[in-house]
Image (cartoon, coloured by chain):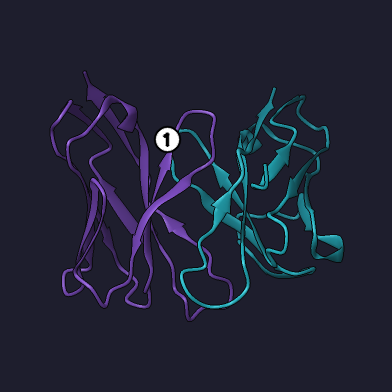
Amino acid sequence: QQQVKQSPQSLIVQKGGISIINCAYENTAFDYFPWYQQFPGKGPALLIAIRPDVSEKKEGRFTISFNKSAKQFSLHIMDSQPGDSATYFCAARNSGGSNYKLTFGKGTLLTVNP
Amino acid sequence: DTGVSQDPRHKITKRGQNVTFRCDPISEHNRLYWYRQTLGQGPEFLTYFQNEAQLEKSRLLSNRFSAERPKGSFSTLEIQRTEQGDSAMYLCASSPRGGGSNEQFFGPGTRLTVL
């Protein structure tokens, strides 16, 4: 059972364009939704995170949009740069659980062409 | 560097051999996690420690896998009688005590190849 579904699997964007990655979740107990960025050979690094009490969070060129009723959230990367080329994972966590484990989507490989 | 460190970074072994990986979390982080990541997939939770206590194990963690965190500091993950299906990146993460976002900080991972 895949609790967090992520799309698209891969994405190619021109430099300066907008990259959009979508995720949907099933478990209504999830209450923390981070996005991680992973470069080849490295571990995932937290990019930005949101809680369901807000519909949008922006940090620099990165914005999370959250739709609680639809159980969907998305990452928008404005003015995409070649250095943004990486794999992006959405994740979710039930903070009321006993261990704070993260449930990840399958990832989106983003390529930003110069 | 005060980030999460893992050793070794790469391990190649023959099927049937035992392997052990080490994770050193960020100092004073009392929560430690192990995840497994296969090619083209997101990390999958394996097990969780709070201090030295192992509080949860995923069903992915067969009886060939064992993890320890003596004294609540570094952790080891051992795989006995390795199988080709164990080939993956093994990631360790740690997070501080307390509420809030409890961001998990990941190490660089140990890539295991079972021949």
Give residue A66's position: percent from left, percent from top. 21, 65
Q: Amino acid at mark 1?
A: Gly
Q: Quadrant of the C terminus of chain A?
A: top left
The answer to whether any part of residue B80 appears in the image is yes
User: Which chain is depicted purple?
Assistant: A
Give residue A90's position: percent from left, percent from top. 35, 52
Residue under the image location 69 percent in, 43 percent down: B5
Q: Nearer the viewer, residue A65 or B1?
A: B1
Question: What is the number of callouts on the image?
Answer: 1
Task: State left or right for residue B25 relative to residue A100.
Answer: right
Furthest toward the top, the residue is A114
Q: Is residue A7 above or below residue A102?
A: above
Residue under the image location 46 percent in, 69 percent down: B101
Q: Which residue is mark 1?
A: B40
Q: Report which colour depicts chain B.
A: cyan
Please identify the quarter of the rendering in which residue B71 is found.
Answer: bottom right
Please identify the quarter of the rendering in which residue B96 is found.
Answer: bottom right
Give residue B112's position: percent from left, percent from top. 67, 31
Please identify the quarter of the rendering in which residue A59 is found.
Answer: bottom left
Q: Quadrant of the N terminus of chain A?
A: bottom left
Residue under the image location 21 percent in, 34 percent down: A80
Give residue A107's position: percent from left, percent from top. 36, 42
